[in-house]
Image (cartoon, rainbow, N blue to C red):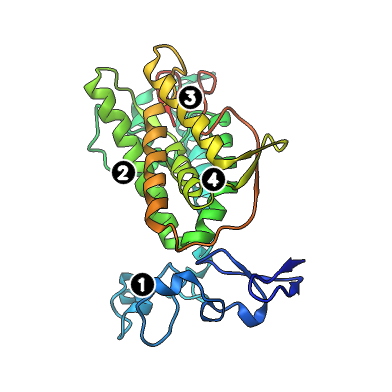
Amino acid sequence: MAKCDVCGREENMPYNCSQCGGTFCPEHRLPENHDCPGLAQWNDPSGVFDSGFDDSVDDPDGSRSLLDRIGIDTGPGGPLGYFRGNMTFVFLVLMWITFAAQLAVQTFTGVVGNPSFYDPTVFRALFTLDPQNPLYLWTWVTSIFAHGGLFHIAVNSIVIYFFGRLVEDYIGSREFAILFIVSGILAGLGQIGIGILMGDAVPVLGASGAALAIMGVLTILNPGLKVYVYFILPMPIWLLTVLFAGYSVFAASAPGVGAGVAHIAHLIGLGIGLIYGNYVKGQIRTPNQVQLGGGRGPGGPGGPGGPGGPGRGRF
C-alpha cells in the first residue's frame, strides 16, 4: 500500500511519475493533475507531456527525430518502447555482456592450457581506454562497460542497480542515458589525461565514473536519502558521499594506497553528478530510501588477474 502524495488515498498499485518521482492515485497520476515540477520545464502549448526519452513529440510534423526519419517507433507500443524507464537495466545487461566478451577474448588469445597468460593487445584495443591509443574512439564507450574482474563488476552493478533506478525515475530515461555515458567517458579521459601529465598513465576500464555521477546526483537532490550499507548500517547518502570522496582524495594523493584503482576517475564522475544535480535541483521530488550492500565502494580494488589484469586502473 502507498499513499497518494496529493490526496493521501491508499493505493495497492500506485503510479510513480517519472519526472518528479512522486506517488499518485489514478486521479492524480497525470503531471498536470499533481502540479508536477517538470511541467514548468516543458514548453508545449498543446499540453503534451514528454516521458523524457523521445524528442519527436516536440516536432509538429513528426520528422525531426532521426529514429522517426528511418521509421523506427519509439512510442510505448513500438520496438524501442521497452527502453523508456528501463535504461538502468539496459546498462547493467550491457555491462555483463561486455564482461562475458572480455572472458571470451581472454580465453581465445590465451596460451593453451593456461588462459591467464594471454596477449593483451586485442583485449586493450577493444575494452580499455589506453593512454597509448586515446583516439580509439570506440574504447571511450566500451571501457565504461568493461571491468577488471568479477568483484569489480559486482560492486558497480549493486550501486547502479539501487541508485540508478532512482535517478532515472527522477530525471527521465533520456537524461539518465546521457548522464551515464558522458560521465563515464569524461571520467576515463580525465583519468588518463592526468596520468599522462603526472607520468603515470595506465589503461583504465569500469563504470564507476558513471556510478559515482549517479551517486552525486542523488546527494544533491535528496541528501537525506537513507542508505543501508551492507543492508544493515543506515547512513544518509550525503555522508556516504563525503566519506567516499575523502577516501578517494587521500588514495589519489598517497602513493601505494588503493593501487590499481582509478581514484581520479571516481572524483571526476562524482563532480559531474554534483554539478548536474545542482542544475536540475528544484525540479525533482525525491522520496524513498534504498539499501546498498557489498564491496569496498564503487569500483573498489579487486584482486590481480582476471579481465583487465594487473596494472590497469579500475573504476
Q: Is residue 12 left or right of residue 283?
A: right
Mark 4–mark 1 distance (CA, rounded to whole Å): 25 Å
Please name the amino acid that badge 3 sits on: Tyr
Residue 288: image location, x then y, percent: 64, 55
Disc 4 element: helix
Q: Which residue is mark 2?
A: 138
Q: Which residue is mark 1?
A: 55
Residue 121: image location, x then y, percent: 33, 26
Residue that protrudes farthest toward the bottom in the picture: 46
CB within 8 Å, label 4 to label 2: no
Sequence-wise, the earlier of marks 3 and 4 is 4
Mark 3–mark 4 distance (CA, rounded to whole Å): 20 Å
Relative to 259, say whether 163 is above or below: below
Mark 2–mark 3 distance (CA, rounded to whole Å): 31 Å
Mark 2–mark 1 distance (CA, rounded to whole Å): 25 Å
Q: Which residue is mark 3?
A: 247
Please name the amino acid that badge 1 sits on: Asp
Sequence-wise, the earlier of marks 2 and 1 is 1
Residue 160 numbered tag: 4
